[in-house]
Image (cartoon, grey):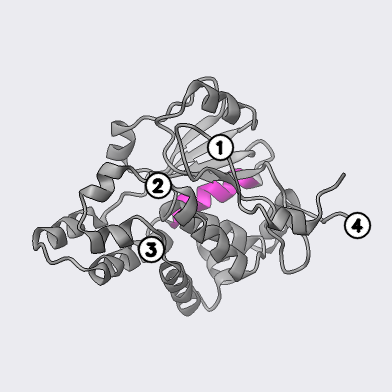
């Protein structure tokens, strides 16, 4: 029996139950403004994959992944190599370096860090994702436009900021309404399992910001895109190469009509 849209909506986003990784999920199921639905099993997002168990590896292998895009910085990858044994997917290193680290260290050294201090740094990071690292996100779209590029999984360390921004770009390109884009983004707050040692190492006001996602960060980045380029669509074309024909192809590959409409 076909799932109804109401059945699907109740479980979105559809997360993978893995022992050694969290915040790994399918981007499928969201409905576009035109009533189409993002296909399941084509695009996945996640956190680090360095602690995958054997059963986790089997579960990921069952997805038939063709590509894994790793947004972690060079040192992050070296400290925690992904465990992708037997996956058979091409791994693409697309490092988006976490450059706020030095500034955060300076703030923490004062021992008077506030949540707003960290949010200010994170706003700069999100702006950098859009303006400085767009080439890496463009590569993800190029892979998705390649018939042999998907199923595809992209991830960073927590799967929340670099990955969250990338997921928002993909869903927006597919014409998913903003409220659904935010819903997917905010799901990190219940799906990501942060290491306890990380929380204990940070002052509580800093931990409250660093260990969660915040909708105003994503909204700020997209507001800047609209201001700088006139619209998000023009940004998608100018920086990510998604002109009208390529955007139409992306939607043809990743969208399907819901039951009763196709």
Residue segment shown in magenta: 134-144
The residue at the point 46 percent across, 79 percent down is 227
Q: Is residue 122 magenta?
A: no
Question: Magenta: predominant secondary structure element?
Answer: helix
Is 120 located above or below residue 165 in the figure?
below
The residue at the point 41 percent across, 60 percent down is 213
Considering only order in the chain, which callout, 3 or 2, is on the residue closer to the N terminus? 3
Give the SS element for disc 2. Answer: loop
Say which residue label 2 marks: 158
Is 41 located above or below residue 83 in the figure?
below
Considering only order in the chain, which callout, 3 or 4, is on the residue closer to the N terminus? 3
181 sits to left or right of 256: left
Q: Which mark is drawn over residue 198?
A: none
**Quadrant containing the N terminus in the rendered view:** top right
Q: Position of residue 191 (x, y in %)?
A: 49, 49
Q: Nearer the viewer, residue 223 or 179?
A: 179
Give the SS element for disc 1. Answer: loop
Q: Is residue 144 visible?
A: yes
Q: Which mark is drawn over residue 126?
A: 3
Say which residue label 1 marks: 17
Nearer to us: label 4 or label 3: 4
Say which residue label 4 marks: 260
Give the SS element for disc 3. Answer: helix
Q: Is residue 141 magenta?
A: yes
**Quadrant containing the C terminus in the rendered view:** bottom right
* Residue contact between numbered discs 4 and 3, judged by CB atoms under 8 Å: no
Cα distance in 3D space between marks 3 and 1: 28 Å
Q: Residue placed farthest to the left in the image?
A: 110
Considering only order in the chain, which callout, 4 or 1, is on the residue closer to the N terminus? 1
Q: Position of residue 52 (x, y in %)?
A: 45, 28
Considering only order in the chain, which callout, 4 or 2, is on the residue closer to the N terminus? 2
């Amino acid at each position: 029996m076909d799932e109804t849209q109401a059945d699907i909506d109740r479980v979105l986003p559809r997360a993978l139950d893995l022992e050694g990784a969290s915040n790994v999920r399918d981007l499928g199921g969201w409905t576009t403004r035109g009533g189409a639905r993002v296909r399941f099993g084509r695009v996945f997002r996640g956190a680090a994959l360095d602690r995958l168990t054997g059963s986790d590896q089997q579960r990921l292998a069952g997805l038939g992944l063709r590509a894994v895009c790793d947004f972690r910085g060079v040192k992050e990858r070296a400290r925690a190599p992904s465990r992708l044994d037997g996956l058979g997917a091409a791994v693409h290193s697309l490092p988006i370096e976490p450059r706020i680290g030095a500034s955060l260290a300076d703030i923490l050294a004062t021992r008077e860090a506030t949540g707003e201090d960290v949010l200010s740094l994170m706003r700069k990071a999100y702006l950098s994702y859009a303006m400085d690292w767009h080439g890496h996100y463009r590569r993800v779209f190029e892979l998705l436009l390649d018939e042999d590029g998907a199923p595809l999984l992209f991830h960073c360390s927590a799967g929340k900021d670099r990955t969250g921004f990338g997921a928002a770009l993909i869903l927006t390109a597919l014409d998913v309404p903003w409220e659904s884009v935010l819903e997917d983004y905010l799901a990190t707050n219940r799906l990501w399992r942060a290491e306890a040692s990380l929380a204990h190492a940070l002052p509580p006001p800093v931990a409250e910001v660093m260990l969660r996602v915040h909708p105003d960060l994503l909204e700020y980045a997209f507001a800047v895109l609209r201001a700088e380029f006139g619209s998000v669509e023009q940004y998608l074309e100018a920086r990510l190469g998604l002109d009208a024909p390529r955007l139409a192809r992306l939607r043809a590959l990743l969208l399907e009509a819901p039951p009763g409409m196709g």
